[in-house]
């Protein structure tokens, strides 16, 4: 898991995409922060894979981890590389209401 997490920050978009796919397969809540970072990736394919994988983690068993990682969304919004406000609102609604 740790090597995949590190690989998700590699300078090669191909390696980041592959690492993100493997992280998603792990189905571990430890994956969530790395997916959030990749939601703002500069390569569209990596962003798309991260978004698809992030959908899996919108389950009640991951609410604590989603809540814990909300500050990452807020930080990425300040960086302004991408607009994650819609997804952020979905996550907040899911945390509050149990649905996105």
Image: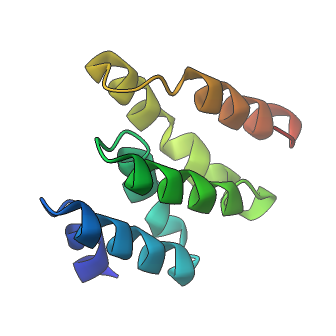
Residue 19, above or below 86: below
- Residue at left 36%, top 66%? 17
Q: Could you say which quadrant of the image residue 54 lies in? A: bottom right
Q: Residue at x 39, y 36 (%)?
A: 72
Using residue 40 as the reference point, say whether residue 97 is left or right of it. Answer: right
Q: Give percent across and percent down for residue 87.
A: 62, 33
| Residue 85 to residue 100: above or below | above
Q: Residue at x 67, y 25 (%)?
A: 89
| 16 sits to left or right of 62 | left
Query: Considering only vertical position in the picture, is 15 above or below 52?
Result: below
Instruction: Tell me where residue 74 sits by quadrant.
Output: top left
Q: Quadrant of residue 5?
A: bottom left
Callout count: 0
Q: Nearer the viewer, residue 45 or 4?
A: 45
Residue 43: give x, y in percent of width and height: 32, 47
Q: Position of residue 77 (x, y in %)?
A: 39, 21
Q: Quadrant of the N terminus?
A: bottom left
Residue nearest the viewer, comparing 21 with 75: 21
Residue 8 shows up from this direction:
no
- The image's colouring method is rainbow
64 displayed left or right of 14? right
Q: Nearer the viewer, residue 59 or 80?
A: 80
78 up-or-down from 7: above or below:
above
Q: Is residue 34 at all visible to an observer of this figure?
A: yes
Residue at the left extreme, as displayed? 11
Q: Quadrant of the C terminus?
A: top right
Give percent across and percent down for residue 59. 77, 58
């Amino acid at each position: 898991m740790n090597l995949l997490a590190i690989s998700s920050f590699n300078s090669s978009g191909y390696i980041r995409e592959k690492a993100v796919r493997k992280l998603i397969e792990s189905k571990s809540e430890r994956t969530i922060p790395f997916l959030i970072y990749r939601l703002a990736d500069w390569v569209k394919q990596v962003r798309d894979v991260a978004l698809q994988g992030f959908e899996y983690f919108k389950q009640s068993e991951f609410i604590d981890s989603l809540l814990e990682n909300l500050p990452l969304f807020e930080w990425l919004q300040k960086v302004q590389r991408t607009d994650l406000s819609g997804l952020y609102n979905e996550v907040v609604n899911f945390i509050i209401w149990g649905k996105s």
